[in-house]
Amino acid sequence: MRSLTTPQSARQFVLDARATGQSVGIVPTMGALHAGHLSLIQMSRARCDQTVATIFVNPTQFGEGEDFDKYPRTLDRDIQLLADEGVAAVFLPATDSLYPEGYSTFVDPPTVAQQLEGAHRPQHFRGVATIVLKLFHALPATHAFFGRKDYQQLKVIEAMTRDLDVGIDIVAGDTIRESDGLAMSSRNRYLDPEQRKRALLIWQSLDQVAGRVASGQRDVDTLTAAMRTHLLGSHSTSAVRDGVDHIDYAVIVDADDLSPISQVDRPAVALIAVRVGSTRLIDNRILTV
Ligand code: AMP
């Protein structure tokens, strides 16, 4: 496995592969790899001749007071996992090779970035769109693989790629979960055992709402109220903390453009962001009618 550290060497690696007619898949990550990341690597390996993973904890997508400094960094283990998966190269840029002194250009993200995560984490998608476009230039691949776990992020990247004529196929991978349903996330390691139990309410709410839709309930207000009630547990009525600590949002919106809907009468998605202790967790589930 080649280790690439500058945008120039990364670009040359991809151009050399493409010059021989090979397809190249890239899998951008922030490291602390888990089975969700590895499933994207495996998709890329199955679909493309060469796969390049990236590990970069992107400072511009973290807000003030967020977890940039304490974001888990497990580089040696990550490199071993990627080598075991048979990736051709890993791109490990230093922060100042992507954001050198004087750096001042940012992508103004598409409309789909405005609500939900965009409303709760101002500048987050500006940072995401900027780093993803920079990675697309450093690694001019044929395909790029992203997880549905970060559903709105996927929509932002799809829209940006379309709007800016990037010419890379965006491929989405399903959310990989722990055996009890909790979506795998690098941030799960922040949870203590008691918080880990409460975090499971997220998946349970999504699963319940999917069940209600399957059995004919279509009214979004009713469905959303049920999600919130389940997430909060007996919070308001009991001293025992058996719900999540805060709901940033728990919504059902149009699956394509994330616009509000009042009835689940088209492909929709339930999206949740909550805090358990000081850990912010997100998850989602597509609702089919
Ligand atoms: P991150 O390292 O959190 O920036 O994630 C890198 C990529 O892995 C993104 O495309 C995520 O959507 C994806 N990803 C993260 N968690 C999961 C998961 N549990 N299942 C599938 N993909 C995931």
Image (cartoon, grey):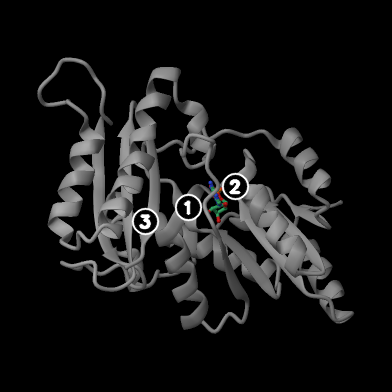
Q: CA distance from mark 2 to mark 1?
A: 9 Å
- Disc 3 marks which amino acid? Gln
> On the image, which quarter does residue 268 sit in?
bottom left
Within 10 angstroms of label 1, few (less than 14), some, or many (20 or more) residues? Answer: many
Q: Where in the figure is residue 144, as x and y percent of width and height?
A: 63, 67
Within 10 angstroms of label 3, few (less than 14), some, or many (20 or more) residues? Answer: many
Label 2 residue SS = helix
In the rendered structure, find residue 149 and report the number of the disc placed on it. 1
Residue placed farthest to the left in the image?
237
| Quadrant (top left/top right/bottom left/bottom right) for the C terminus | bottom left
- Residue under label 3: 123
Label 3 residue SS = loop
Q: Earlier in the sequence, mark 2 or mark 1?
A: 2
Task: Compare residues 209 and 242 and report the one nearer the observer.
Answer: 209
Name the residue at 75% across, 59% down.
52
Task: Compare residues 94 and 149 and report the one nearer the observer.
Answer: 149
Contact between marks 2 and 1 (CB within 8 A): the answer is: yes
> On the image, which quarter does residue 115 sit in?
bottom left
Q: Where in the figure is residue 107, as x and y percent of width and height?
A: 45, 69
Relative vertical location of residue 153 with respect to residue 196 in this rendering, above or below: below
- Residue under label 2: 36
Task: Compare residues 222 and 84 and report the one nearer the observer.
Answer: 222
Asked whether mark 2 and ligand 1 are closer than 8 Å, the reply comes as: yes
Q: Where in the figure is residue 184, as x and y percent of width and height?
A: 53, 40
Within 10 angstroms of label 2, few (less than 14), some, or many (20 or more) residues? Answer: many
Q: Where in the figure is residue 197, as x and y percent of width and height?
A: 39, 25
- Disc 1 marks which amino acid? Lys
Q: CA distance from mark 3 to mark 1?
A: 20 Å
